[in-house]
Image (tube, helix red, strand yellow):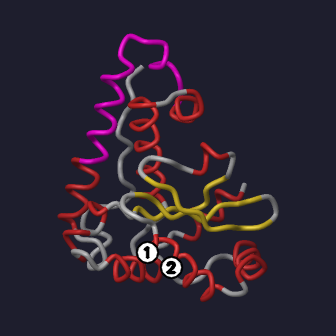
Amino acid sequence: MAFELPPLRYENDALAPHISAETIEYHYGKHHTAYVNNLNKLTEGKPEAEKSLEELIKTSDGGVFNNAAQVWNHTFYWNSMKPKGGGKPGAKLAGMIDASFGSLDAFKEQFKKAAAGQFGSGWAWLVADGAKLAIMTTGNADLPLAHGKKALLTCDVWEHAYYLDYQNRRPDYLTAWVDNLVNWEFAEKNLG
């Protein structure tokens, strides 16, 4: 069974002006596609080819882990955003954010600070940690699933996610992402 690139739920230009169609074309069309293709090359004809991404993430290392995790992370990232996103989460998630961070504004500031502070390439995550929510960052292909945590949202802070639109201004990208792109419905669905 070959791994496939999941389709985007929106057009390449749907996140503009916050993320351009050109960035989507490179990030989704080139980077994400390359992880899928690499994973297929690494697993072709092997028992790993029959496993799910989640199983590969939990049982592999090296190139198989990196590519499986990046396919999973990027798919999760695309779903963590939506056109005309941002705003406020639903009542259940809003209550958990207030209990865990003090307020939605406090969460946004803590999330942006964590994401801006992630050295080099990686990810910022909102995760469920028992009955509380937490922010975590991971480097390279690492992800909460590998640490027994449940991801609710992620923001990609690899430079290819924002460089064409923001150059070296990661904080500007993060502000645009949190204020205008977050898909709160997706996060709440992930609560289960």
Residue that protrudes farthest toward the right in the picture: 131
- The quadrant of the image that shows the C terminus is bottom right
Above or below 153: residue 37: above
Identify which residue, 32 or 115, lies in the foreground.
115
Q: Position of residue 87 (x, y in %)?
A: 53, 83
Which residue position holds label 2? 113
Q: Secondary structure at mark 2?
A: helix
Which residue position holds label 1? 116
Tell me the amino acid under the disc marked 2: Lys
Tell me the amino acid under the disc marked 1: Ala
Q: Position of residue 171 (x, y in %)?
A: 38, 81
In contact (CB < 8 Å): disc 1 and disc 2: yes
Q: Is residue 32 magenta?
A: yes
For the point 34% across and 60% down, which residue is it? 158
For the point 29% across and 72% down, which residue is it? 19
Give the magenta-colored segment's residue range.
Answer: 31-52
Task: Indicate left or right for 90 with 160 as reference.
Answer: right
Q: Main secondary structure of the magenta part?
A: helix
Q: Position of residue 92 (x, y in %)?
A: 75, 73
- The quadrant of the image that shows the N terminus is top left
Q: Position of residue 37 (x, y in %)?
A: 28, 32
For the point 26% across and 39% down, which residue is it? 34
